[in-house]
Image: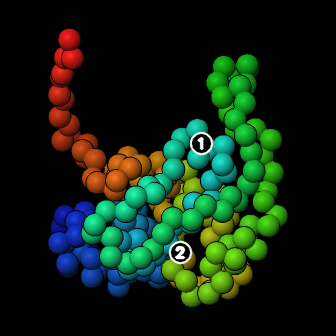
Amino acid sequence: MTTRALYYPDETEYIAEVGASYPDKGIANWEEGRCLFTEFGYNILDIRCQAEIDQIGNFPREYPSDHRSGARFVEVPLIFANYRYNSELNKKMMMNQESNKEFLDQVAKVFPDKNEKIIVACSDGRNRAIQALEALDEAGYVNIVGLRGGYNMWNRTWDAKMRRRNLPGNFQEEWQHGA
């Protein structure tokens, strides 16, 4: 990879290297995921349940002008659950989890072509994303990639309009007073 290893629309060497690495590399970080989405037509399949999306946030619905590929964000939950307060742990937790038995059928309705380019994302890119990747692989999908860090890392890097947020160590504070 290039020394910067950050996605910017004018980093042609980085973009070419990322494009050549997938889907074989298998798991993309949030920089590679944005590059695959914007440059190479990889759709992002958000497999989080609706309660989690409502609680934590969703992928952008507005694409920036540098989005050239036509890829999109699609939500198909792997599980159904809701958030409830757990008095023993003194916090809200995801409860009543049950698998979405229609997951593969719902994905097939959205992506009938098994060659469709898909990035699978859950909240953190671990357990549920791996389960979904395995299910999609068994169902015959061939251009599938997992998103390391899931929505949490994507949201930490890209804002709702898919602009880069300040990276660690580059913080700016602005104090304004409205009175």
Disc 1: CA contacts within 10 A as few (<14), some (14-19) or many (>=20): few
Q: Which element carries disc 1, helix, strand or loop?
A: helix
User: Label 2 amino acid?
Assistant: Ile
Where, by quadrant of the figure, is residue 88 drawn? Answer: top right
Q: Name the residue under label 2.
A: 118
Q: Name the residue under label 1.
A: 54
Residue 148 lies left or right of residue 159; in this view the side is: right
Vertical placement of 79 versus 170: above or below? below
- Local packing at callout 2 (Cα closer than 10 Å; few below 14, some 14-19, many 20+) is many
Give the residue type that dot 1 points to.
Asp
For the N terminus, the quadrant is bottom left
Q: Which residue lies furthest to the top in this view?
A: 179
* Residue located at (19% from left, 78% from top): 12
Q: Which residue is drawn at 22% across and 66% down?
A: 8
Relative vertical location of residue 97 with respect to residue 92 in this rendering, above or below? below
Residue depicted at x 61% and y 61% = 75
Residue found farthest to the front: 179
> Residue 174 location in percent, x, y?
17, 28
- Please give the name of the residue rendered at 47% of the width and 48% of the height, measured from the top-left corner: 152
